[in-house]
Every structure is written in C-alpha cells, then in structure tokens.
Image: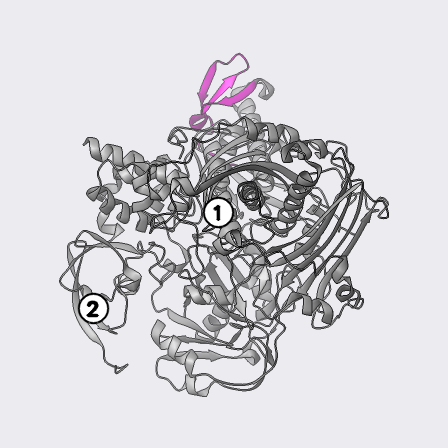
Amino acid sequence: MHPELQTDPLACGIGSPARRPDGEAKVRGEYEFAPDLCEEGMLWGATKRSPHPLAKILRIDLNPAKAIPGVHAVLGAWDVPVNIFGAVNKDTPVLAHDMVRYVGEPVAIVAAETPALARRAAEAVVVEYEVLTPVTDALEALARGDVYRHVGLTYGDPTVVGEVQVEGEYVTPRQDHSFFAPDAGLARPDGQGGVQVIGATQWVHADREQIAASLALPEEKVLVINSGVGGAFGGRVSMTWQIHGALLALHSNRPVKFVYSRRETFLARYHRHPSRIWIRHHANRDGTLVKLEARILLEDGPYSHTSAAGIGNSCSLIQGPYRVPHAAVEGWAVATNNGMCGSMRGFGVVEPIFACESNMDKLALALGMDGAELRRKNAIAFGDQWTFGQWQDRPAPLAELIDACQSMPLPPEPSLAGPVDLPGGLATPSRPQDLRRGISLAAAAKNSCISEGCPVHTTAMVTLRDGIATVDCAAAEVGQGFVTCAIQIVQSTLGISRVRISGCDTTMPPSATTDAQEQTMTSGPAVHLAAAKVKERFLIFLGREYGHDPSCLDIRDDHVVNTDGSVLMSVADAGMGLVFRATERFSQRETRTIDEQDSPHPMHVSITFSANRCVVDVDVELGLVRVVQMDVALDAGCVVNPVQAHGQIAGGSLMGQGLALMESCDYAGAQPVNPNWQTYVLPSMADAPSVHCRFLEHPEPGIPLGFRGLGESPHVQAPPAILSALRAATGHDLATVPATPERIAMPVGEAPAMLLGDAGRSALDRTGQVRIGKFLRFQLVKE
Amino acid sequence: MNQELTLSYHLKVNGVDREVCGADYTETLLHVLRYRLGLTGTKEACEDGQCGSCTVLIDGQPVNSCIELAAEAQGTAIMTIEGYNRPGGELTPLQKSLVKHAAVQCGYCIPGLILAAEAFLKENPGATESQIRSGMDGNLCRCTGYASILAAISEAAKESHAS
C-alpha cells in the first residue's frame, strides 16, 4: 500500500500526478461500458456454438429458430458475404461452414426481442456433426507438421561450447485475460446501407477493416466507435461478436446488442498460448555467458491469429537482457484444437523470460554464484549486438536496475498480524513457525511496440479555442490511462491547463493499437507534435495581430508571455475566439522480420529493461505461498504520470503473480475445464503483495520527449521473480507455472521430461515439412 | 417450471417503488436492475458470485446481485450505486478517496466495490489494512493490483472513524 501515491486535482503537465478525466464518472457508475449500451428498439443477439473441438458439419437447420415468434434474424455461414477474417492472416470463418475446430466456435447467430428468447432461438438451431479426433497436444501438432511459423535463428558460432552447461525445460500455462467487462456491444444500421459498431476494442481501425471486408462493404460504410472498455490486457485485439452484430443489424434493420456471459467470453476468445521451452546456457567458470541454445514450442489454436508474431518475439527475447556471443534458437507456433490462443500482456515474451530467468537461477547455482551478480556480469550494454542481429543503440541500464531493486528496503520478518498475512490467506492452516522466506531477483527485456515489420504510427489532432485544447486521437483507452497522459502532454507542450480529450472512433485518422506497451510512446509523441504545431500557429497569429516577434513569445500557465517572462495576456483572450488546429503523424522506426538479418532495420523498435526483487513466505509442507513484496525497477524513459505508472506496475505484477501461482485455463480432451471464475481463480486483495517501484528515466532516443513502454514489463517480470524466490525458499527446481501448492510441496516428477531437449530431439526431426494450406504461413501486415 | 409463466412484482430500489412486469422467475436481480430498470451502474462480470462487481445493498447488506433472484428481493430495500451517489454530483468521501489514490483504472469493478466497502466500513469503522484485506476479499479487480484500492479504503476508514 502506498498512501503517499496520490493524484492531485490541480496537477498539470508531464511528470505530475494528474487525475484521470473519467475517474469521477467511473466512481459514480455513470461511465458507459460496452455491456451498458442500450438503444430504443434494439434486439438481442445470441450465438450457436460448437460443442465439439473437431467435427465435420453435416447439416445446419436454421428453420426451428426462425419459427419462434419474436426472432428477427437467424444467420448461418452462407449469409456472410465474405466468410473469412483474421487479425493477421484471413483464415478464420466468421461462422463455421464445413468444419468446427474448437469448442465454442460460432456456427449460427440470431437476433430476438429479449435475451432469453435469443438464447432459446440459438439453442433451437439444429446442427449435425460428424465428430473427429482433435489434436490436443502441442508436441503431437509439431510431429504432424501443423506449424504456423517455424523460426530458426543462429548467431555467432553455434558449435562453441562453454565450460559449464546448464539446461532445463520450462512450462507455462494458458492464461486468460479475464478483463472484467465481458465481450459486449451494439451494432446498428446507419440508414444508408452501412453499419455502426459500438463496442470495446484495442484498435478501432483494425476492427473496421475486418468488419468491412467480411460484409463486402467499403470501409467508409462501417463506423467503429470505442465504448468504455472494461479492461483489455491484449484480449480485445481480435473480434468476437462484432461482425455477427453488424450482420444481424443489417439483416433485421434494427440495432442488435450482444453481451456474452463469462463462460462465453472464455469460449469465444483466445488466451495466452501455453508454452514448453527447452533452454541450455553455456558459460565460462567465471560466469560469462558463452552460448544460448533454445527450442520453443508455443501452442496456438486452430486458426493462426497472432501466432506468428508470438513465436518471433519468443525466439528473439529468449536471450533475456544478457550479452550472448553465440546462439542457436529454434521455435514453432503450432495448431491444436484446444481453443484459440493469441496476444496477452507481454505477448510471446512472458514465456521465454520465465525459461531464461529460471535457467539463469540454475546456472548461478551450478557456478556457486549470486544470481544478481551473474545477471549484472552478463548484462547487455549500449552498443552490444543481440542474437537477432539488432544493435542495442539505446540505453540498457540493467546493472543500474538491479542496484535500484536491491537498494529498496526489505519487508519486516513474517508478520503475525493475522491470517490474511500468511500463505493461504483467510482460512489458512499455516502458522508463522511453518514459514520459510525466500528472496530473489529476476530481470527482463520486453519489446516495446509491435515488431517484425508491422508499421506503428499514430496521427493525432489538437485544436485550441478560447484557451481550451481538445485532443482527437483514435488511441484506445482501455483503463491504462492514455487519456490522462495525452492531456498532460498537451498541457506541457501548449502551456495551458484546460485540455479535453474526445472519444475514439474510425472517423479519426488511425492510431497505434493499445498493444505491446506502445500506446504512450507512439500516440504520445503524435499528440505532442500536433500540440507543438498548434502553438507555433497560435504564436505566429499573435505576432501578426499584436505586432510581436513570434520567436519572443511563449505560453506559460495559460498566458502568453514574453521572453523576459512578463505576462502579455491570457491565451483565452489572445485567440480572439478563433480556432487553431494541427494534425500530425508520428511513426516509429521501421522494423524487419527476425530472419531478415541483412536489413538495415532493427527487429524491435525498442526494448524495455526491468528487474524485480521478490520476497515470498512459503509453507513448505503445504506448498502455500504468500508473495510479501515485489520491488520493481524499470527504465521507462520519460514517465508522464508517476501515479498511473505505479498503477501499471502494481497491476501488471499481480497479473504476473496470477500466472506464477494460480491461473491456468485447462483443457481435457480439447474441452475447457474451467471457463468461469469459480474454477479459474484470479488473485484477490488477500493475495496482493506490496509493490514498490523505482523508475529510471533514460529517454528513448528518436522519440520526442523520450517516452518508453512500461505496461507489459511488470507482467513479464513477475513470474520468474516469484519462482526464483520460491526456489530460494524451498530448494526445489520449480520448472512449471502456475506453481500450485501441489507442485511446490511435491515437486518430484514435476520436472518436464526434456521432450524438446537433445534426448527428445527425434520428435522434432520429423517436422521438416511445414504444412501450408489450412495453416497459413506468416504474412506481414504491410501498408 | 413452465417457461411461459411470467411474473409481475414490485421492487423498492433506491427508495423508489419500481414495477417489474412480465419477468421470468429465473431472472437475476442484476439483470432486472440493468436491463428492465435501466440501472446500468451495477456491473455484470462473472455471473457466478465470484467477483463482487454486481454488489448492491439489500437492507444494508452487500449482496452479489448476479446470484440473487429478483423476484425474491420483493419487500426489501435495495440500494445501487445510483442511489448511493449524492445528488448534484458531489462525491462521497469514499468516492473522493478512490479518485485521489488512482484506484480507478478501467473502473468496471468500482461501483460494486464502493457498495461493498460502504457496508464494510459501517460495520468496521476504523478498519486496519489487514482487516480491509480480509473483509473486502470478495471484490476482485484485474487492473490495479489492489494497492491503490487498499490505500483509498484505508483513508476512508480513518475518516469514517474520525467522524
């Protein structure tokens, strides 16, 4: 708890603890989220979903649903003009046509007068299936060659060997975003043959492109408006109900609302891909890393979605924030029928950093070295080259970050305050004398901005009138606080306090997606450039109107001032009621794929470095854990709002703790086991550790004001830090997350069987041929 | 039960008598509040009684409205965030404290959390951080990591104790 971290209603500008513009509406329950949307005469949508993970569709009969009074539209695959869509590759049916490939795949959609009637009508649709045997195991998928993308990366001399070699195989689970507002929204016909889709998204323009393509409409006929977004965490990158809603609205000529249940939100959406990673570090006896070998298997769903980007991130950042002169890394993203997988906070990097850091712990143990010392010794530095052929041409202050973590005060001894402070929480059988305390440190590198050739840019508009500025930017606010940051940036750049920000929709020029911790570092500069241009135009106007030299004028505290600081007049008066406007675009540097090592461009726009020292109390016999404290240090470039930044660190760290200790979305026989919050358990207030953070502020080169991403790193960082502390406390070689009580208390047999290591290599050798067809190869999104 | 059988009844919500017409017996209080009475400040998130986002007060006690049948709430006094809000837009001390400590990110869990905290602080004025962590454990949040929420409720607890 940090009572000292407070916002200030009068705070203004970059670096200040300004308040969210939407905070008051949110605490009064008046902020409109997607599930809250209502409209006169609206119908309710519902979806008929596949109960089978893999089946041939023999027959679909929509007539029983159509016959129900009060049902206005019932649609199947043949009603979709272009029945294929996708965030990257267009390989996903809008409605299943001949096959279903995961439990929950949409087969038919209905619109009816009430939610209950819509659900009943969806039930009434008859589908006959020929059930087939699903692929349920990632290794089986690999052996079959069902690979979306294969990455092979060698660097330096892969035949070099180190004096000390340490290997391990590490497993991470399918994590659900579990954002709070379920998938929901409203689509309505615009009366001119087009459609408006209002819902929660991370990227309005990407949604519009896909909706329009599926409806065979020009993009101008589709308006996508972002409603209030109740959390996203990477989970709202691709669409669920949106195309369905638009189709039903056009067919029924009525507004149609969808609200998924929590179970449906689990089934219909993708999750973080489970991973299995084999890694071997080679080092000299003094601890200097010599070589990295790794094989990374990411399990993706039956449609490609963002799988190619995930494995690219993984194969590059398995290196961790360390200098490695030689490397041989191979990775596969494979297809199974265990539901859809896709991006989630720390996409493709949570998994390799967990493996890398866990194996670094093992290496430290083998060398008899302190883990922090080993990391400091091998820290990548400015001017070094990464294994993926990118120069580290920006700050890389890992040693400084480790020092910052270690300089933060440790917590007092295990508390006797009450059961809520003990492992196991409220009704715990643990007693203070049963506990062992573990303290350890892990580090991380996470790419900021989408990588590998995806263009990252934002166009923003700033308007100044009567001393008040308005920001128009299509950057999605999902709770992270970009709206506050945008206002603060304009306040600083323009020198005024009164700044508003408009909602976000596709009438605005495109912005970057709220992904890959890129929003503030991409849209922030765009907003800044537009505000700077407005200021320039405003001062030129003033110079002409009032006979001043514009270069001698400035704006400070809502007033026009002279170079000597003397106040000339208020901005509100000086503008004479006129409108000053500018629209500016900011683009991140161009990137290339991991394979294109001859290209002059980097693979990642930027890499954020962080470290986390974690303190845990463990009841070793029962395997119960209390994470007491996490001390996080992160190089954030310029921090726009320290209180919000701390909120990202605390929230991201706890979400990482969920992955480390409790969250796993399980499938058995390709059927979801726990698609609800009774059995998919989220961290609660009783689980929350005390999170302290220190920000280094080495500005990001090439970015006006020097912003760098910070929202995902804490999530990437937390699981290895917690597991490292658990290893310190228990002495167990914990290789699998979530480290549930059984795994901690009875680790025998828990270590995976080196299926990807040299012993299991034969399985991999059968995967020479990658199937193309149903499983498309990686295609870059290029403009 | 006959699916076609519907009920009409009255609910006392935020001090006002509201009529519910033609509802299924199985409709939850959450759905009736949100979709029949238009009180969308009460949020649906898990529909499983797990997260507390739909918390309302029934006769002053916090209840997960997603697992409460609306028809069974007849004869009680129901308070939602709309009834908790002070008219005229002024925030309550608890709401002010949540804003001040940046305890609101996406904000979806907040209305339910406020009502739960209101009931909790009434029973536990001056609650310590440890007591809040155990007493408010039924209200989940996915964004904040809870530190800011704890700070906000702790401050409100101190104020409620002092006043």
Q: Which residue lies furthest to the left in this view?
A: B75
Q: Say which quadrant the C terminus of chain B sits in.
A: top left
Q: Range of the magenta residues? A: A553-580
Mark 1 to mark 2 CA distance (whole Å): 49 Å
Residue plotted at (50% across, 14% down): A565
Q: Name the residue under label 1.
A: A620
Lateral position of residue A775 relative to residue A464, left or right: right
Q: What residue type is labelled 1?
A: Val
Q: Residue B140's spot in the image, x, y percent?
A: 38, 51
Query: Nearest the camera: A614 or B76?
Result: A614
Element carrying mark 2: helix
Three-letter amino acid code of the residue under disc 2 = Ala
The chain that hosts pointer 2 is B
Q: Compared with residue A773, is residue A55 higher up or lower down, i.e. above or below?
A: below
Nearest to the observer: residue A43 or residue A282: A282
Q: In which quarter of the image is residue A449?
A: top right
Indicate whether residue A560 is drawn in magenta: yes
- Of tags 1 and 2, which is closer to the observer? 1
Same chain shared by disc 1 and disc 2:
no
Position of residue A596 measured from the top left corner of the image (x, y, whole percent): 80, 50
Residues A389 and A205: in front is A389
Labels 1 and 2 touching (C-beta < 8 A): no
Q: In which quarter of the image is the N terminus of chain B?
A: bottom left
In this rendering, does residue B103 appear at all?
no
Q: Where is mark 2, residue-wise?
A: B71
Which residue occupies the extreme top position in the image?
Answer: A564
> Which is nearer the eye, A509 or B144?
B144
